[in-house]
Image: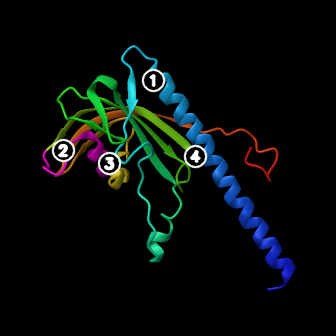
Amino acid sequence: METKELEGLSEQSRRAFEFVQKLYHEVSYMIREIEAALADEPEKFAICKPGGYGISTVASRRLEPVFVNQWLIRRFSVYFVPENRTQTIAGTSKTEFASDLKALCLRVVMDDKEIAPSVFFGVIYNITTTSPKLQKFEELISHIESQAQKVFANPERIEYEDGSAKFAGKLVFRTLKFPEMSNQNSLE
C-alpha cells in the first residue's frame, strides 16, 4: 500500500472509532440522566451494579470469526431496583429475590440488522429462580443478557422461563436520536 492510501485508511479508522466513542458517550449521559431522575422519584430507584457501576452485556475477545462481531458492544442493558430493596457491598449491589420484586429495565441497541439504534424501557416482574447458582437479582442480569434474543423477542409481552429463572415484563421501544456531529474530528 502506498503512503497516501495508508494515511487515508488511518484517518478513516480514527474517525470511525471517534464516531462510535461519541455514540457510547451520548448513551452513557442518557443513562446517568435516567439514573438521576429515578433517584428523585418517591420510590427512589438505584442502578443495579452486577460487576460494579456499569452496563450489562455479552462481549467477546475471542478470535474465531463467529465471536469477532461481539468485540464491539452493540447491545446492553441497565437495571434499576427500588433503593430500599438493594444494598451496595464493595462496589456491587445485592438485591435479594422476593415474590414482589420488580426491576426497571433499560435496554439499548446500538447496532442490529433488524432495527435502527433504539432504546427499550419498562419493567420486569414476577421474578423467580429455581437455580441455586442465582442467589441475587444481579446474577440473573447476566443470565438475561446471555439469553437476550429469547428474552426480548417480544418486548411488549415478555414471558420467559428456562431451567434457571422465570419472569414476565413489558418494555416499550423508541428509536434513538443523537445530536448532529458538527465537528467530525472532535468528541466534544
Residue at 24% over, 29% down? 101
Please name which of the two marks, 3 or 1, marks the residue nearer to the observer.
1
Q: Quadrant of residue 100?
A: top left
Q: Nearer the viewer, residue 65 or 28?
A: 28
Q: Please name the residue that numbered disc 2 is placed on.
A: 135
Q: Please name the residue that numbered disc 4 is placed on.
A: 117
Measure how far apart labels 1 and 2 are at the Cα level: 25 Å
Return the disc, 2 or 3, that comes first in the chain's sequence.
2
Q: Residues within 10 Å of mark 1 (few under 14, many from 20)?
A: many
Measure how far apart labels 4 and 1 are at the Cα level: 23 Å
Which kind of residue does numbered mark 1 sit on? Answer: Leu
Residue at 74% over, 43% down? 188
Image coordinates for residue 123, horizontal then vertical, percent: 35, 30
Q: Please name the residue that numbered disc 3 is placed on.
A: 144
Return the disc, 4 or 1, that comes first in the chain's sequence.
1
Disc 1 + disc 2, Cβ < 8 Å: no
| Magenta segment boundaries in residue numbering | 130-144
Residue 131 is tagged as none
Return the disc, 4 or 3, that comes first in the chain's sequence.
4
Measure how far apart labels 4 and 2 are at the Cα level: 33 Å
Q: Nearer the viewer, residue 149 or 131?
A: 131
Query: Outermost residue, front direction?
Result: 90
